[in-house]
Amino acid sequence: MCPRFSAVVAGFATLTLVTALAAAQAHAQSSIAIDERLAAAAHLGVGDRVVLASEPGVRGDTFVVGAITRRGADPSEVARDGYRVRLHLGDLQRLLGAGDRVSRFAVTSTDPARTLERINSVGFGFRAYPSAEIAVRTSKTFRVLRRFHAAIGVITIVASAIFLLCILLLKVDERRRDIAALRLMGVSRTSVITMVVCEAALISLVGTAFGALVGWVGSLVINWHYQGVYHTPLTFSLVTPGILGFAAGLSILLGLGAGLTAATRLVRRPPLALLGR
Amino acid sequence: MTIAIATPTPRPLLKSELLSARALVRDYPVGGEIVRAVRGIDLEVTAGEYVAIVGPSGCGKSTLLNLLGAIDRPTSGTVAIRALNVGAMTDTQATLFRLHNIGFVFQRFYLMPTLSARENVELPMAEAGVRSAERATRSHELLEYVGLADRERHRPTQLSGGEQQRVAIARALANRPALLLADEPTGELDAQTGAEIIALFGRLNAKGTTILVVTHDEDLAAAAARVIHMRDGRIIADETRRRS
Amino acid sequence: MRRRLAFASLRRRRARSLLAILGVAVSGALLLDMVMLAGGMRDSFRKLLLVRGFQLRIAPKGTLPFDTQATIGQASEIIATLRTNPDIVTVSPILGLKLHVPSRNVTTVAIGLDGDVQADYELLSGSPVSGADHIVANQAFLDATHARVGDTLTVAVGYDTPRRRVVIAGIARFFYTAAGELVVAVPLATLQAMGGPAVTDRVSLFMARVREGADVERARQWIADKIPRISAISTGTALQQFDQRMGYFRQLAVILGSISLGVGFLLVTTLVTVSVNERVGEIAVMRAIGVSRQHVVEQVVLEGVALALTGTILGMGLGLVTARAFNAILSDFPGLPAAFEFFVFRPRDAYAAMTMLAAAGVLAGIYPAWRAASLPVAETLHGEAIA
């Protein structure tokens, strides 16, 4: 990160933004970086002067817009509608009257474990965390969502399996006269089952291919929609080879299972019974 | 034995005339061509007659029966039953007419496999709005008449072919129809069972039921008082063997 | 007789009927869950907002309550201003800070409030926040600090702020905190004193109760006009913000609900269509013996409705079970108030789901039924004879 800027915690203070075309200042003014949404909403560009204050109605300081930034693909930012402004640390401390205070430090160390232990043993009122732990904690939202999506997925798979089994049962049942004729001709049970299972496998393959296409298109639509809603480059839905492989494998397995079940049911009955005699 | 040859000229409806067909034609599109299954048939059937329609396969006898029974509509010509032109009726009218005036017996019985024998007989009565108690009484009577009073709770799969056909006959008589039409009623039965059905038809006709059967069965044809011979969609002979 | 025929047809092919019912049940369960999700979370949030009857929240300008660490200055002046409005009957100021218990190495959320008008907790045992050094804690705090009611603890807001000895006066259930979160309630003045000049006469939030019958929106507008340096949020506004933030779940609910309905419809229509195709001969005979087209359609539609309704009833029960499971998963969201629920059962949701599935069942049967009833009788019989 550029040393000229420090990250501003969005919720550290309420910043009241007043756009002003200020007269030329005698002294050099500090620069700030604003996010592109704020730039668009307040019609600001690089070089514009703005007055920032810690509260509404309070006298503030004038700054120059030095840069316009784009929101990163940070999942934790997705639902947050607030604007972001980056200032030099000293400027923000002065603006807020915070004195020599910060929200947090980021520390690099040659021996992170030992550093962590030492900080936590001497510090009071604050704690040190490994960055990985912070990442885990802040990603808890998405782990919860992932479990939720997985649970929904399980239910849809169960419903699909039932649907598939029902359809295949119907299809095979519809052909019971053909199957009866084959059996009467001398075709073995195994051959009939193989024939039906192959048919089921073919249906599953075609269905899988079609379903994968629908899923891929759906994924594109989801990303396009939510990237627009949340103004973020974040990818919301991703179809990976692994996911595709899992879906294909599962649907083919279900199809084969359903076909086998349906065929076995039918060949167990005597051919004449299948003809209704 | 006198043989009456059908004439093309129309004549006035006789008082006892139940069914009258005039210049009946039925065409079917088959593979891009038009097949004329019935070619200008004139026919009269009086109340109480027992008529058999015979002829080689594909001569149009089943088609004729369907036209006479208001199941099918003629391409041209008229069919009048009880002086009503059934060929010109809408589907709803024809359905209602069949319910109250015509009983059908099919070669393959066509009983509802999920209903018992008694329920199959009750089906047309239920459709006609007959009350439950009356339906039960009448269906029992009919099954008794056809000799199946002890099998009324049995499903069709639990009955033999002959028994199923007798149930079908009882069903056809449920609403006291003016006309009983049968299409190859002994076609799926063995000789002995077929003879039982033939005898049943005989008893029904003796009681005054007007019967029209389409058949290949010589014995069934012999039992009829009048035999109409068909070939290539036409009546080639109309033979009255005895007065019904 | 039509009902008899319809149910008999379903019983005839038990395996497929059962599978279809099961399929509709699973679809119905998912549909109910999605209907509950679409409306339930909003309901739950609204109940949470109004748990103590406070219809208005006043937060730092441009923020939502406790969305940021910003505070509102000159709090007493604001309270005085709010009290000039006769429609505003109660004002509850709240300050949120972190409190540390050095001896137990525990950090807790501290809510500074006025015990007489507080709306943040329900006392379970002991005494409420009254004396300057009396605090009320939740069970999670007591467990973490191994303390009990009556114990004295030394606490501080930060490293360089004064420490203070406080007495645990009572145990409470806090409405707006997440499950497992450590929370204590402290007298507002005490917490402000402990926080030093940075929080003198400052609060994080006000809650205001409007008298019964008064126009809440009007009161909100009055506050916004009178005190432009704050944001006044009514329950309605808060719900709008909620809808925006939770839009994903509502959209998911609509999409999945629609898919469930579609799957249920497809299943019933497929089954009815195949069943009818198998029975064209029977249907033609029924028409031949005089059963009207309408009655044939009714019988077939009844089959579809029977499948759909049976599956729906099963699905409602299954849906309640799966909703509990989903709720348990989603309640793990960090920062979510423990009292908040995503899936809230409301009878009208069940009725809505059942009606939709029943309607789907009716529609699913209509087309195949009408097709079958409209087949030419003679041709169909001829075709069946050949077959």
Image (tube, coloured by chain):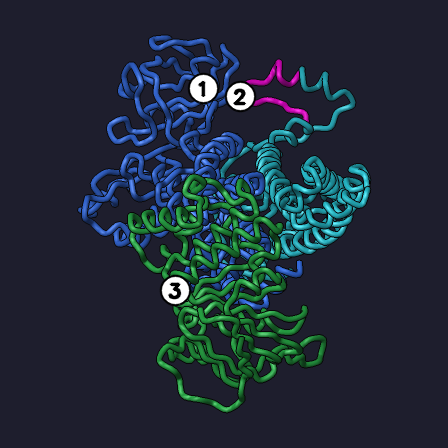
User: Label 3, label 1: how many angstroms apart (C-alpha)?
Assistant: 111 Å
Say yes or no: labels 3 and 2 on the same chain.
no
Q: Is residue B229 magenta?
A: no
Image mark 1: chain = C
Image mark 2: chain = A
Please name whichever residue, A59 or A158, is drawn nearer the observer in this view of the structure: A158
- Name which residue type carries label 3: Gly
Q: Mark 2 and mark 1 in contact (Cβ < 8 Å)?
A: yes
User: Label 3, label 2: how many angstroms apart (C-alpha)?
Assistant: 110 Å
**What chain is the blue one?**
C
How many C-alpha atoms fall within 10 Å of the one at disc 2: few (<14), some, or many (≥20)? some
The reply to whether residue C117 is in sight is yes
Circle on res. B208: 3
* Span highlighted in magenta in the image: A118-130
The reply to whether residue C263 is in sight is no
Circle on res. A125: 2
- Name which residue type carries label 2: Gly
